[in-house]
Image (cartoon, helix red, strand yellow):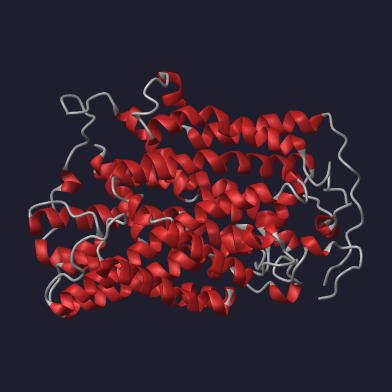
Amino acid sequence: MSMDPAVNKELWNEDLAPTGAAQRTWRWYHFAALWVGMVISIPAYMLAASLIEGGMSAWQAVLTVFLANVIVLLPMLLIGHAGTKYGIPYAVLARASFGTRGARLPALMRAIVACGWYGIQTWFGGSMIYTLLGVLLGAPIGGGNLPGLGINPGQLACFLGFWAVQMYFIVHGMESIRKLETYTAPLKIAICFLLLGWVYQKVGGFGPLLAQPSAFVAGGPKAGLFWSVFWPSLTAMIGYWATLALNIPDFTRFAKTQRDQVLGQSLGLPLPMALLAALAVTVTSATVVLYGKALWDPVDVASRMTGVAVLVALLILLIDTASVNLAANMVGPAYDFSALSPKHISYRMGGYITAGIALVMMPWKILEKTENYIFIWLTGYSALLGPIAGVLIIDYYFIRKTELAVDQLYRDDGIYSYRNGWNTAAIVAFVAGVLPNIPGFLNAAFPESFPGVGAGFKTLYTYAWFVGIAIAAVVYGLMMKDRAVPAMAPARSLD
């Protein structure tokens, strides 16, 4: 791939370059397999658990998960269009709206969130190794907790070990991750059905939770409070995929056609996510009969199996966690960090940075309480990423009419340079979308320090993603409406 002499080397490297026609080989089934591989994961499994704990019935929980994924699918398809049409990743697409330099802001926001997720999934993987070793040795390992960390040496060693295993795929690049997802997706589906068969055989049915009524019905412990739980839960469910709703061009840039990316994502996300939620509720229902209490953690369930089954189950969960983590939480930030300094940071180096930050974020702290995971982590970052999605969608569809001059995205003096590389309208829209959610977030994260936050701000925070994307979209649209958009410069081929 040759580079036009006018292209700024500070905005260019081969990892951020548009993919050529020869590189766009992904068909719809690759995307479907990729999504099935990412959907079937421990955090996704546990999402339905949080809804049941909140008082929903089994089918209310499943339908809430399904609805959230239908909603988040829309921005994924809209933003993913640019990746397929122009072969560019998210970090480069953001330059059209935020500016060639300003795009570093949304890239950094997305990257930091993904680093947190990468650490969380790595912690889950390390926990499985820890459990597996305990089963093999016949006793828990590790000893007392380390000062300041809150975990024991065995847990820390297993966390670091799983972190090291994933480095292989960072070193070998994007195609190795795509192959891992494609090959493991059918295995994950088969294991789900085997798990259902196992609990049915053990219990002779699927347990009591499936027949348990909602806590919100008349006479129930939370009668009349359904909507106060539903809306924040829906926002949190949307927040689960809010990161990929932004950086989906990192994957769709390899799609052979628009039909492939649309069909693959539509088949691969909402229905499998709902089916996984149904599986989680069903298996958990059976654990009430088997063990006398609801076990929401699949690692805990797997550790209670006997014989070879426990080893097989934990090994499959390990493979699953690695494949999900690399596809969902490493690809995006690797591109994003590369975009911060294309001249010095390659895609591979971006992956190393992602893995390094995940180490120091101590992900087990996020998972200490369900409230931390759902209402602080998921809802909190959805408030941060929603406004970015609003700006990208309005700019690409309403301002640009899906037409971009690709070579201009790599020029400091091009039509996307705005003022010194920053588009003020995008920055103002982003801030306007984030600000209303800050009081509610501070109250949720630090209730003792911010007890006086008004009820209105608390209510607003329960709709954080919706509020952010709507406000940013309106503000950006109004600010750009009266601004003369530069005429499209002829797009030069960068192949």
Report the front residue among 208 and 101. Answer: 101
On the question of residue 437 being in view, the answer is: yes
Left or right: 155 with respect to 290? Answer: right
The reply to whether residue 76 is in sight is no
Residue 112 rendering spot, x and y as whole percentages: 53, 53
145 in relation to 441, above or below: below
Q: Nearer the viewer, residue 98 or 204?
A: 98
371 relative position to 105: left or right: left
Residue 96 horizontal/vertical position (percent): 77, 48
Q: To which quarter of the image does residue 477 belong?
A: top right
| Residue 43 sits above or below residue 131 on the image | above
The residue at the point 64 percent across, 55 percent down is: 80
The relative height of residue 146 versus residue 29 in the rendered view (above or below) is above
| Residue 65 horizontal/vertical position (percent) | 38, 46
Give the image location of residue 468, x and y in percent.
56, 34
User: In the figure, is residue 182 to the left or right of 81?
Assistant: left
Residue reaching furthest to the front: 147
Q: Image point 66% across, 56% down: which residue?
A: 90
Judge left or right: residue 140 versus residue 380: left
Quadrant of the image for the C terminus? bottom right
Q: Is residue 156 above or below residue 232?
A: below
Of residues 382 and 115, the one drawn nearer to the viewer in this rendering:
115
